[in-house]
Amino acid sequence: MFAAQSFFSCFRGSQEDYHEEDLCKLAAITRREHMKSNEFMGTLRSNKFVIRMSKDTYQVLKKHLQELLLSLIQQHLHFDVFEGRPRNKQTIEATAGAVTGEATFEANKSKVYYGIPPEPDLGVVIEDESEDDEDKDKPKDDVNSSSSQKKKVKKDSNGPGKKKQEHNPNAPPLNRQLPFPVMKDSDKLVKITLIREAGKRVRLGPDLLPSICFYSILNAHTSLNTVSISEDSSLLSGGFEDSCVRVWSLTPKKLRMLKPPSELAQIDKEAEDVLERIMDHRTAVESRRLIGHSGPVFSTSFNTDNSFLLSSSADRTGHYFATASHDRTARLWSTDHPQPLRIFAGHVSDVNRVAFHPNCNYVATGSCDRTVRLWDLNTGSSVRFFTGHKGAIYSLSFSPDGRYLASSGVDKRILVWDLAEGTLLTELKGHSDTVYSLRFSRDGNMLASGGVDNCVKLWDARAICNPDYDDLERDNDNPASSKCVTYELGSYPTKRTPVHSLHFTLRNLLLASGPFTPAS
């Protein structure tokens, strides 16, 4: 054992900084019996460390391998040999850092259907609200004329000559798409709102940055675990250490409860404003505290129409769509099944983050093993395996078109991945501490980031993701060498508030939130 400790002390200093946490786990082994109970030792024994190298490099290496070294390599290492020229040092460092080495070629060989399928036919004609506003200022005769013209448009748009949406060739084929429930009227109303708001959306760019609205949560710097904002930007929820969930209204419309059953029975169910009549205005408040968990709440998420709020806690209760866990797995759930529909196993450490792909056929996970994986919901298999982070991963965000995935975490860096090619697109540096939140704008032209350094940063996603964008010169063989400082469009520090959540509204207003940290 003394010889092993001497060997460890001699070569510990020559290892990369991002392996320091792993080395500390190995340093805790001082007896032979410690090896059986050491979690990191178990990971190394059950997984070969992957090293990618060119065929020419491998041939040169083989000439210097003696029988003893060759035996050790075959037992603990896996050489993933590829055709082509050898990589330079910067390219190798860009994808290094994972606990089990780099991703093999086979790990990213599967085809990913990243496209977004066409929207279902809502069966209604969506009129532009701006036209209604203009009609208010017109004379009565003009209003009648425009109204009849709208009716004519409505009749024509429902006719047999209506053009059908073409199927996106990059979207999942119809025979492999997940079964979705029939759209309810409330779902259709949400879709209509999305389409109307999209028509008023500001198209962001380097010359047109978004306005940012920041919500600071007071007296919560040690107890707030998570923050989320609803899809329509009307509600904000927070999960706390004391096992409670609190919901705030971000609009003048306050939170209300349903009327008592005796009063509900007297309401006309056929009335157009029945959804408004069933609410009790006497109970209106700006925020509401939800109690039910018996452990710290780590994540909250609103459903599309804000009728449900999902929460996950250390007490292991609740109904989820997808969850991440310290048991090294992610799981897919359905609210009408008590057991998970899929278990995604492959990470070798805690899974910190899970995110649904925009087409709902894939799930991405980020882990403490410093890797990102993309899982196919149909098969439950891993179709993308990305390495390059030097620390635990705490945030994931898909681009609106579904092709790109951004990840960030403890290493203060943001990595952008191309899901179609299975490669690292670029590396963004600028934050000085852990990056907790990422979000693409609604048009995909901008990426927002925020974290422990009390700062919101904006990045030019169009320049990052568009290979034909000529304003920047990038080395395609070495994405890490990109002049990522040119991608940064703006940096906006807060007073004393770390950024826990970012959200772009339907019109591309950026909302951010976090707990205010008082001066010590």
Image: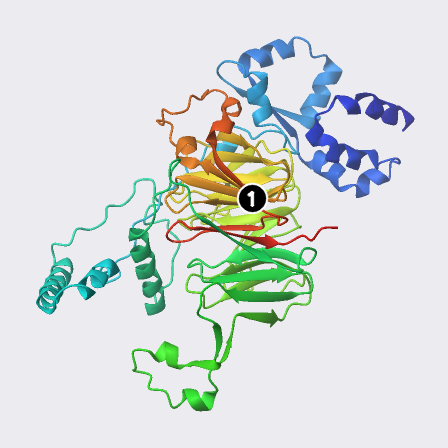
Q: Position of residue 445 (x, y in %)?
A: 39, 39
Image quadrant assignment for residue 4: top right
Q: Is residue 381 visible?
A: no
Query: Residue at 52% of width from left, 61% of height from top?
Result: 236
Instruction: Name the residue located 57 percent from the left edge and 20 percent from the top edge.
Output: 90
Front in this rendered view, residue 8 or 518: 518
- Rendered location of residue 509, percent (x, y): 42, 50
Q: Secondary structure at mark 1?
A: strand
- Residue 409 horizontal/vertical position (percent): 60, 40
Q: Is residue 59 visible?
A: yes
Residue 429 vs residue 328, the one in the foreground: 429
Q: Is residue 283 above or below residue 439?
A: below
Q: Quadrant of residue 440?
A: top left
- Left/right placement of residue 455 relative to residue 336 reads right
Q: Is residue 179 above or below residue 263?
A: above
Residue drawn at (62%, 50%), measured in percent from left and top?
497
Q: What number of labels is visible?
A: 1
| Residue type, label 1 | Gly
Q: Write down the residue under mark 1.
A: 450
Q: Which residue is the extreme one toward the right?
A: 2
Looking at the image, residue 458 sits to the left or right of residue 433; the answer is left
Where the N terminus falls, by quadrant? top right
Q: Is residue 167 above or below residue 179?
A: above
x then y, percent, for residue 399: 42, 42
